[in-house]
Amino acid sequence: MASERHPASGAKAKTRPAAAAFVLLLGAAALVLAIAGSISLGAADIRFGTVWEAVFRFNPGVQQHVVIQELRLPRTVAAVLIGAGLAVAGAIMQGMTRNPLADSGLLGLNAGAGLALALCMAFMPGNYMFTMFMCFLGAALGALLVYGTGSLAKGGLTPIRLTLAGAAVSALFVAVSQGIEISFKIGQQVAFWQAGGVAGTNWKQLAVVGPWMIAAMIGAIVISRSITLLSLGDDVAVSLGQKTVWIKIVGLAIVLVLAGAGVSIAGPIAFVGLLVPHIARYLVGVDYRWIIPCSALLGGLLLTGADTVARLVNPPSETPVGVLIAVVGVPFLLYIARKQKGEL
C-alpha cells in the first residue's frame, strides 16, 4: 500500500448522508447555473432568452443559435463530463491506494496519455477512436512506470515517493512528446492541447468519448462500497469478504478510461482529481457511496466554472483552464505534502 494513513485525515471519520444529500442538491443547482453561464458568457455575451431558444427552438439561420449549438454547447458538455471524470478518477485512486496525493495528473497518467496522443498526431492523425484507445494505453503505461519506480525505493511506496516518481515519469514523457513535436513539426497542434482546455470540442468527439466516460462513472458508483472498504486497508477489506485484487483491477480500468478519455479531449488538466475528492470527503465523510457522486458533481462544477472564467480574464483571448486550476491546486498540493513529510 502507498500509505497506512487514511486519505481523509482532515475529515471526520463518519458518514454524513444528510450533508451528502444537501451537497448533491445544492451542487446540482449550482451546476445548472454554471452551465447557463458557460453557454451565455464569452468573447460575445448572449442573452439567456437566446440560449433557451437555441437549445429548444433551434433556427440554423440565426448566427447566435449556430454558435451555441456548434461551439458553446459541446464545450460546456465536455467541461462537465471531463471535470466529473477526473474527480471520480482521483477519488478512486485515493481510496484504493490510501494515498491523499493521488491524482491522474500527478501520477503520470495524463503525461502517458499525452505521449500517446503526440504519437497519434504524428503517425495517424484524424482517427479519433484509435487516438482515444492509444490514450488509454498511454495512461496505463504511465501508471505502470510510476508505481514500478516508486516501489524500488527502500521501504516501499509512500505518498511522497509516489508523487516524486510521478513527477519524474511525467517529465520523461513530456520531453519525449516535445521531441516528437519538433521532429514531425506538430508543435502548434500539441501546444494547443498541452495548454489544457475544452475549447474546440465538437459533438463527434463527445459521441466517441461520452459513452465511455458515463459508463466508467456508473461503474465507479457500482464499486463505491468496495472502495470504502479498501480505503480502510486491505486486511479489513479481506476480512469483510472483499476480493481486493479484482476490485483494484476494475478500479484501475475505470481510472484509465476516465483519465485517458479526458486527456484525449482536454489535455493534461491536473489537480481536479486531487482537490475535489478532498473537498467531497470533508463535506460528506468517508463513505465512497457518497464521495464518488459528490466528487462527480463538484468536479463538473469546478471545470465548467473555470472554463467560463478563463474566457473572461483577458477577452477576447482565453487563459488556459489548467493554469487557473493550478493556481488553487499547487498550494493545496503543498499543504497535503507538508502533512506527509514524515513519510519520506
Image (cartoon, rainbow, N blue to C red):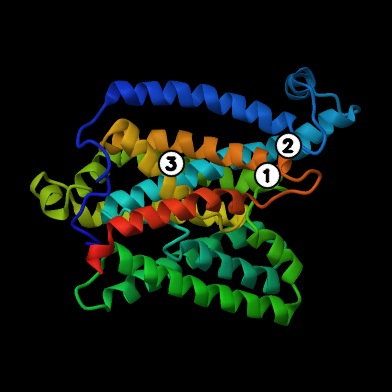
Give the residue displayed 51% in from the left and 57% down from the top: 260
User: What is the C-alpha distance between the residues marked 2 and 1?
Assistant: 14 Å
- 2 or 1: mark nearer the eye: 1
Circles 3, 1 touching at the beta carbon (< 8 Å): no
Residue type beneath disc 3: Met
Q: In this view, does 120 lie to the left or right of 235?
A: right
Q: Name the residue under label 3.
A: 217
Q: Residue at x 11, y 44 (%)?
A: 240
Which residue corresponds to the image point at 43% horizontal and 42% vertical from the top-left? 276
Label 3 SS: helix
On the image, the x and y values in percent for residue 334 come to 40, 57
Q: Is residue 24 visible?
A: yes
Quadrant for residue 311, please give it: top right
Q: Mark 2 points at which residue?
A: 72
Going from N to C along the chain, the mark reached first, 2 or 3, is: 2
Where is 53 relative to 225, above or below?
Answer: above
Residue that sits furthest to the right in the current view: 61
Drawn side of residue 165 relative to residue 188, left or right? left
At horizontal 80% and vertical 24% (from top left) the residue drawn is 58
What residue does disc 1 label? 310
Q: Which label sits on residue 25?
A: none
The residues tagged by marks 3 and 1 sit, at their Cα atoms, a distance apart of: 26 Å
Q: Where is residue 172 in the image (x, y as percent from the top left)?
A: 51, 77
